[in-house]
Amino acid sequence: MAHLLVVESWVGSMSRLLPRAIRENGHTFTFLTRDLHHYLRSAPEGTAHPLLGARDIITADTNDIEALLPDVERLHEVLGFDGVVTSCDYYLPAVARIAGRLGLPGPGPEAVRNACRKDATRRVLDDAGVPGPRFAVREEWAEIARAARDIGYPLVVKPVDLCAGMYVRRVDDEAELAAACRALADFPVNARGQRRTPVVLLEELLDGPEVSVETVSYAGAVQVVGVTDKSVGGAPAFVETGHMFPAALTSADTEAAEQTALAALKALGLTDGVVAHTEIKLTSAGPRVVEVNPRPAGNRITELVRHVTGIDLAAAFVDVALGHAPDLRRTDTGLRSAAVGFLVPEATGTLEALDGSGVRDLPGVLEVQLAEPGRAVKAAGSNNEYLGHVMAGDADGLGARERVETLLDGLRSGLVIR
């Protein structure tokens, strides 16, 4: 039995999947957070958040890494950690620093920092010759406008240090560029109280479908688990509306996506102790890297993988954090594909009606999770505003996405926002 230190977490699905994976493998964990109420607020009424089942819960300023490191060293002397993890992007660099300081398994801090900073990722991959969009990183408006003209409209504006598609926007002219930059400047501190870097990443708008490559690295070897597709809506934002595993691709496109992801992980130095989720655009000019995330995929993708292959990426995440070889053996689950679709609100108001009671018992349905009436609703500008999701599988082929889309159409017909 091992003892892990869990430093913060998302409050979505991984905040449940990670504790489950730790417990099911016979391990325990200590939970370290700066704000316990952040997790209490996210738990359904009458239930305890899974992270509160930790052996110990300790409060410390997880945003001040220099002060945190000696505190964690003292905790390690008393509690004895065998590994350290987080499922929250904003704390991945801190966890890498902690692992290095305590001599625990994990990727190098510089590799993680470069993957978590979108501008650093672009520079590292560009220097290594890994294909990506044309880009520029600027701070002052005159330089931003000039770089945008050089790249050419339409283009994509991104923050360098936010997640879930927040403030990522397509812009078609200088007026839209100015509006996107103002909106980003008006969000100087992220949801975890961390002050943002005030630079703007400008990228060429890439054509073609987007996929993600799910990988696990251990002892210098990277194994591809599979390729997931992605559907996007909410223009000019880029809101993920659904995924299917495996992606319905030709063998050539699958190979191209996988090899591009492997090249990106190698360039960044993420080849040991990492479960990664690398996003790739399959453009008319070939595959291009969108982002490299040094943690398991979100938005229920890990569950899609588990339903189809039997591979538990959350458990693999725990294994590599402990320096153990991950179990990546495939089993016959009876499904050839699995998909998830998200209910994305297009209006702001209050949720008056959303009934999914008849959906849960339909053939092939794996999960249904829907918001309760009375909830405040915001028109989606990122992946943070979903009203729920439905997941379904297909035992015969790659029909899971079509099945999910049909189910979502039924849910939308009963959706009332006022």
Image (cartoon, helix red, strand yellow):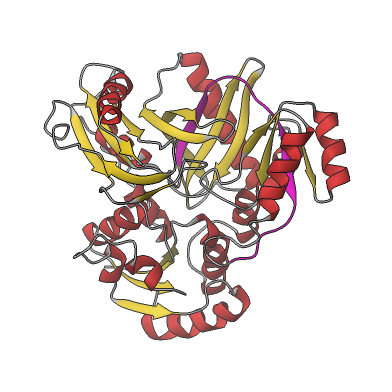
Question: Within the magenta stretch, is there residue 333?
Answer: no
Quarter occupied by the C terminus: top left
* Residue at (71% x, 49% y) in the render: 182
Does the rendering let one see residue 124?
Answer: no
Quick one: 179 or 386, which is closer to the camera? 179
Instruction: From this view, report whether residue 120 is shown above or below residue 50.
Output: above
The number of numbered badges drawn on the structure is: 0
Quick one: 87 or 413, which is closer to the camera? 413
Q: Position of residue 290 (x, y in %)?
A: 60, 35
Q: Position of residue 322 (x, y in %)?
A: 40, 61
* Residue found at the far left of this picture: 361
Quick one: 94 or 381, which is closer to the camera? 381
Quick one: 334 or 244, which is closer to the camera? 244
Q: Position of residue 187 (x, y in %)?
A: 63, 57
Instruction: From this view, report whether residue 111 is shown above or below residue 23.
Output: above
Magenta stretch in the rendered image: 194-215
Q: Position of residue 250 (x, y in %)?
A: 46, 13
Question: Within the magenta stretch, is there residue 201?
Answer: yes
Identify the image quadrant of residue 216.
top left
Q: Is residue 367 left or right of residue 30?
A: left
Instruction: From this view, report whether residue 281 is shown above or below residue 220.
Output: above
Q: Is residue 5 left or right of residue 141?
A: left
Quarter occupied by the N terminus: bottom left
Identify the image quadrant of residue 87.
bottom left
